[in-house]
Amino acid sequence: MGRLGIRRTRLFITVVLMALFTLLITATTNAQTTADIIAKKVSKLQAKATKTKGIIELDSLAFDDVLAKPRNYSMVVLFTAISPEFQCVPCKNFDPEYRLVAAGWSRIPDKSQIFFGILDFKAGQSVFQKFNMNSAPSLLYFPASDSPESSPSFDRYDFGKSGFQAESFANWVNARSGLKIDVQRPFDFLAFSLKIMGFAGTVGLAHFLYTRGGKVIRSKYLWAAVSLFSIFIFISGHMWNQIRHPPYSMPSRDGRPGFIAPGFQNQFGLETQIVAITYAVLCGGAISLMSSIPRIESPSKQRLAVIIWMGVITVMYSVLILFFRAKNPSYPFRLLF
Amino acid sequence: MSTESSSTVARVLKPTILILIAIVAISSRLFSIIRFESVIHEFDPWFNYRTTQHLVKNGFYDFWNWFDEKSWYPLGRVVGGTVYPGIMVTSALIHNVLHFFNFPVDIRNVCVFLAPMFSGLTAFSAYLLTKELKDSSAGLLAAAFLGVAPGYISRSVAGSYDNEGIAIFLLVFTFYLWIKAVKTGSAFFGLLTALFYFYMVSAWGGYVFITNLVPLHAFTLLLMGRYSNRLYVSYSTFCAVGTLLSMQIPFVGFQPTRTSEHMAALGVFGLLQLYAFAELVRGYIPPKQFRTLLRGGVVAVAVIASFGLTILSFSGVIAPFTGRFYSLYDTGYAKIHIPIIASVSEHQPTAWTSFFFDLQMLIFLFPAGVYLCFKELKDEHVFIILYSVFASYFAGVMVRLMLTLTPVVCVSAAIAYSTLLDTYLETSEHVLASTKPAIAAAATSAPTVIEATTSDSKATGKKTAAKAAAAAAAAAAAKSTDAEAKAHAKSAASSEKKRFPIFNLDSRLLVILQLTWFLFMFAWHCTYVTSGSYSSPSIVLASRQQDGSQMIIDDFREAYYWLRKNTKEDAKVMSWWDYGYQMAGMANVTTLVDNNTWNNTHIATVGKAMSTSEEVSYKVLRHHDVDYVLILFGGVIGYSGDDINKFLWMIRIAEGVYPNDVKETNFFTPRGEYKVDHDATKTMRESLMYKMSYYRFAELYGSGNAVDHVRNARMPAEGPTLSVLEEAYTTENWLVRIYKVKDLDILGRDLKDSTAFDKGRVRKVSSLKKK
C-alpha cells in the first residue's frame, strides 16, 4: 500500500513537472515569438527608413501596426497635409525641416531606437479623427512602451513656442529620447554664392566710397533719407512684425477689410506698410509746406500748392484717424470722415 | 509800441506761459485722484512707497543697510543694495523739508504727487532743450507738447509713484545740459551733466540710454570730422566724473567698468584722448612724419585694444550683455531663453496703434522735425537725430520704452510745428532776415503799415496778435509791390536758395487755422487718453452698471486688509509674483516672490506649486512654510487680468526649471486649446490653481449654470474639491480668494483621507464595496 502510494506520488510529481516544463517551454516560445515579431518589425522599419532617408511614410493601417504595443522603440510622427488642395503653408514650410532631422537619423549609432514617420491627411484620415486633430502640422512623440496596457501617452511638439527650425525640433526629440540627432543642413549653393556676391559687393562699394565716394558718404541727404526711412519703419510697428511674425494680410471677412487685423494690439504686415506710407505722406506734406512752398515765386501757383498740400494733409490725417478708429471703435474723434 | 517794451512783454509772457504749461501738466495728471482718492497705484509703486516709508521712519543709514526678511521668504532681500534709491530719497527730502517748515504733509501725499510735480519740471527742461535747438517759441511748444503727451503721462499720473516719474525729467535735463556743454565747451556744464547723470543713475535703470547715447554723439561728431576742444572738454569731464559718481550707487557698483553696456562710454573716452593727443603732436611734427606716426599709432592701438578686450572678456572681467539688454538687440532671445522677461506686458513689442495712441499728431510731425535738424546740422542737431533714430527703434521693441521716445518726439515735433508757424506767420527773425528784400520793397510803398506790423510781430509772439500782424504784412506785400518784391528777392538771394514770403492771406489763413485745429484735436486726444486709459489706479477698479451709475470694485484692498488684520504677524503668503509688492505694502505679510524678479528658480517654484496636483504642491507649500495662498479670480465679474489667464506663464516658467514636474502640453486639449470647462485636461483640472479658482464656484449659480465670464466657459456643475487647503476668505466680487494651508493631520493620515472622513464619506469602505 505504502509503496504504491509512493509510486503514485512519484508519478504525480513527474506529471506535474512535465506539465510545468511544457508550460515553461510554450511560454518561452511565446515570448520568443513576440520578441521576434518586434525584432522583425524593427528590421523592416530600419530597412525602409534607410531607403527613404530616415522617413517612413505611413497610412492608417501602417500607423496602427507601427505603434502597436509593446514596442521597444520610440516613434515620432508628423501629421501633415501636404497636398496642394489643403493650402497648408506651414505644412510645406516644415516638411523640409522635418526631413532634415529624419536624415540625421541615419547618422545615429543605434538606429533601432527611434523612427520618424509622416502621416498625410489623405492617407490617414481615420487616425486624424482618432486623435481629434483638426489642424496640421502636428508633431507627436510616442515613447517606447513595454506593456500593452499603458495609456496612449505621447508628447506634442509646440510649434508656437519652439518654432519651425529643425534644430529646435531635434533638441526636443533629444530631450525626450536621449538620442542626439545632429542636423546637417545641406550645403546651400545659392545662399553661399549670394553671400560671396554680397561680400564682393560690399568690398566694391567700400572701395568706391573710399576712393571717390566721399561725397556720397558725407552727403547729408543720404543720411537724412536713411534716418527718416528707419524712423518711419519703426514708428509704424515694424519691430512688432519682426518679433511676432504676423501674416501679411488676410482675406476680408464680415465687412472688415483684409488688411486690418482685428484687435488693438494686433496688426498685419500690409497694415503697417500702409500706416508707414500715410505717415510719410503727412510728414512730406509738412516739409513741403515749410520748405518748398516758400520757394514758389508766383503767388497764384503758391496759393494752389498750399491748397493742394493742405488738402492732402487733411485727407490723409482723416484717413489715419479713420484707420485708428477701425482698430479702436470707441475712439471718439474724427476729422473729415 | 517800441522794441524795449515789447521785449519786456515777452520776458513776462514766457514765464507765465511756462507756469501755465506746468499747471496744465500737473492738473491733467490728477484724474485718478479726483475719481478715486489719493492712493498709490499698481504694483511697483507699492514697493517704492514701502521703502520710502522705511526711509522716512528709520533714516537714511538704516535704509541703506536694510535687509528685508519679509520678501523672498526664506531668502530675503538686501534692499539698500538692490534698489535705485533716487525716487525714495527725493520724496523723503521733500517730506523733511516741508516738515522743517512745519507743513505736516503725509509722506503718502508726497509720493502720490511727486510724478505730476516733476512733470512740470520736465516740461520746463523740454523748453530749455528746444531753445538750444531752435528758439524759445519752439521751446514753449515743446514744453506744452511734453506736458500733455500721453506717452509720458502713462507713467506719471498722480499715484504712479515709480522711478520713471522723476527719471524722464532727469533724462531730458541731462540731455539739455549735455548739449549746453558741447555748445559752450565749458567744464562747468560738463560737470553739471555728470551730476544730473548721477541723479539719473540713482533713479532709473534706463540711465544706460544716456550712457550710450552721449558717447555715440561724441563718436559721430568725431567721424564727421567735428572734433573740437569744446567736445573734448565737455565729454572728458562728463565721462570721468559721471562714471565715478555712478559707481557710488551700490546697485550699480562696478558695472560701469565691467559690463558691455557701459563699454561704449569708456571706449569713446579713450578714443577722444588719443585723438586729442594726435592733434597735439600734429602741431610739433612735420606733416609727412606725422602721417607715418599716425598710421603706426592707429595700428598699434587697434592691436592692443582688441587683444586687451579679448583677454578681458575671456577672463571674465568684462561681463557680456545682461539678459534684459540683450533682448533689445536680439529680439527673439527673450522669448526662448527668459520667459520671465517675455511674460511682462510692458516688455512686449509696440504695435503701430500704441504709437498713435501715445503721440497722435506728433508722430508725423516728428520726422519732419528730424528733417529740419538735418537741414541745420549743428552739433546739437546731430544729437537729436541720433536720439530720434535709436529711441524709435527701442520704443518699437519694448512698449515701456515709449517713455524715452516721447521727449524727443515732442522736441522735434515742436521744431517742425514752430517752423510751420514761422513760415506762415513770418514773425521769427530768421525768416524775416531771409525775406528782408520783400519787406524792404514793401516798406517803400507802405512804410507805416510795415513798421507797425514788424514791431508788433516781434513784440508779442502771441498767436492772435501775430497772426493779424503777419496777415497785414502779407496783404501789404501782396497788394502793392508784388513785382518789386520779386525782383528784389531775386537779386538778393540769387546764389542762395530763394525764399519768398507767403504772398496770399488766404493760404496763410488756411494753413494756420488748420494747424490750430490740429492742435485742438491733439489736446482733446490727450485728455481723452489720459482720462480713459492712464488714470486707473488698478488697485481700485471702476465699472459702469446697467443704469449708468458707477460701481467701485475694491476687492484688492479688502483682501489685503483682511490679511493684515486676521493673520499672524509672520504669516507667509504665497501668490504669483505680480502681487508681491502690494501684499508687502498693504497687508504687511511675508511674501515668497514679488515684482523684483531677481530669482527665477524661486518664481518657478511658486509656479510649480500652482500648477501641480495637490499632493505634489502640498510638499512645496510645507517646505516653504506657506500659511496662505492668495489668487485672483475674475470669472465672476469678468476681470480678465486674473490668475487663470496668467496661468500659462506660470506653467512655462515652472517648466523651465522643473521640466519633469510641469509640462505645458498637458494643459492643452488634444486640439491644442486652453480650456477650463468640461474639455479641460486632467492635469488642468487637478492643478492647484484651477482648484482654487473654481472651488465652490458652481454653487454660486445653482444647478449647472455656472459661467466663467472671462473665458465664456460653461463650468461643470460638480466643482473641484480641495483637501490640502481650506478657503479662508473670498472678497465681495470674488476677485481675490485666500486659502489657508492645512496643517499635517494629527492622526498622521493623508490629508485627502482625513478630509473625506470629516465630510462623512468613508472612502476606503466605499471603495471596497465597489470592488
Image: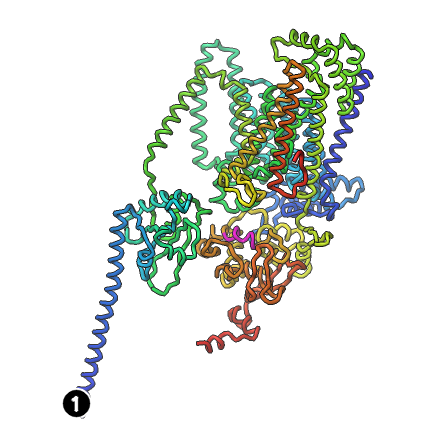
> Which residue is farthest bottom?
A1
Q: Does the stretch in magenta take in B339?
A: no
Q: Is residue A150 left or right of residue B186?
A: left
- Crowdedness of circle 1 by 10 Å Cα count: few (<14), some, many (20+)? few
Q: Nearer the viewer, residue A92 or B150?
A: A92
Q: How many marks?
A: 1
Residue at 52% x, 50% y: name it: B649
Residue B727 occupies which quadrant of the picture? bottom right
Q: From the top left corner, tell me how far across and down residue A173 is, in percent.
A: 37, 50
Stretch in magenta? B644-651
Residue A2 occupies which quadrant of the picture? bottom left
* Residue at mark 1: chain: A
Q: From the top left corner, tell me how far across and down residue B266 is, in percent.
A: 53, 28
Q: From the top left corner, tell me how far across and down residue B425 is, in percent.
A: 72, 21
> Which residue is farthest front?
A255
Q: Which residue is disc 1 drawn over?
A: A3
Q: Does the stretch in magenta take in B650?
A: yes
Q: Nearer the viewer, residue A102 or B631?
A: A102
Amino acid type at image mark 1: Arg
Query: Where is B484 relative to B28, above or below?
Result: above
Q: From the top left corner, tell me how far across and down residue B344 is, in percent.
A: 56, 45
Figure colour scheme? rainbow
Residue at 82% x, 18% y: name it: B5
Asked if residue B160 shows in the view, the reply is no
Q: Main secondary structure of the magenta part?
A: helix
Residue at 44% x, 36% y: name it: B315
Q: Nearer the viewer, residue B310 or A45?
A: A45
Q: Nearer the viewer, residue B693 or B43?
A: B693
